[in-house]
Image (cartoon, grey):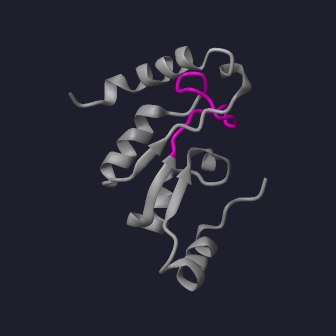
């Protein structure tokens, strides 16, 4: 699989998108970029939204059903001062029959990281 060229993407940002479009990060980026830090190194405060999901590495899974490091990624976004949104793009067909129970299980995975 081809690697995402963050230098090229950053160049596109400067030449075409700088004044009009902020970035969103899809945690499926793990397929082409080594760390979330690479995205922050390249785009910084311009990242305003994340599809924050688990996977193996593919998939749009509930946290705990894949093998992505939830705690490590949360630590990273906190350390980087991220102030944007986390979207839960849970689209695996296995969750469609009983979405409420799967949403509950997904939110349970976040509990150790929530304040209050």
Is residue 79 shown in magenta? Answer: no
- Percent from the top left, x then y, of residue 27? 56, 45
Measuring 61% from the left and 32% from the top, which residue is drawn there? 90
Which of 23/96 is in front?
Answer: 96
When asked about the image quadrant of residue 101, the answer is top right
Stretch in magenta: 51-66
- Percent from the top left, x then y, of residue 38? 50, 59
Does 2 sit above or below residue 50? Answer: below
Which of 70/20 is in front?
Answer: 20
Numbered marks: total: 0
In this view, the residue farthest toward the bottom is 15
Measuring 58% from the left and 51% from the top, which residue is drawn there? 34
Does 20 sit above or below residue 88? Answer: below
- Percent from the top left, x then y, of residue 19? 47, 80
Does 84 sit above or below residue 12? Answer: above
| Left or right of 62 in this view: 47 | left
Does 73 sit above or below residue 63? Answer: below
Measuring 67% from the left and 61% from the top, which residue is drawn there? 4
Is residue 57 shown in magenta? Answer: yes
- Percent from the top left, x then y, of residue 18? 50, 79
Measuring 50% from the left and 76% from the top, which residue is drawn there? 20
In this view, the residue farthest toward the left is 116
The rendered magenta stretch, by its main secondary structure, is classed as loop
Quick one: quadrant of the C terminus?
top left
| Left or right of 43 in this view: 4 | right
Which of 109/80 is in front?
Answer: 109
């Amino acid at each position: 699989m081809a690697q995402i060229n963050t230098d090229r993407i950053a160049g596109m940002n400067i030449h075409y998108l700088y004044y009009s479009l902020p970035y969103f990060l899809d945690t499926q980026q793990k397929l082409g970029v080594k760390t979330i830090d690479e995205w922050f190194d390249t785009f910084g405060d311009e990242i305003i939204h994340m599809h924050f999901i688990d996977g193996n590495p593919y998939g749009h899974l509930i946290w705990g059903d894949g093998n992505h490091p939830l705690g490590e990624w949360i630590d990273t976004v906190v350390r980087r001062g991220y102030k944007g949104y986390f979207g839960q793009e849970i689209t695996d067909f296995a969750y469609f029959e009983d979405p409420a129970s799967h949403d509950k299980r997904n939110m349970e995975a976040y509990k150790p990281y929530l304040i209050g």
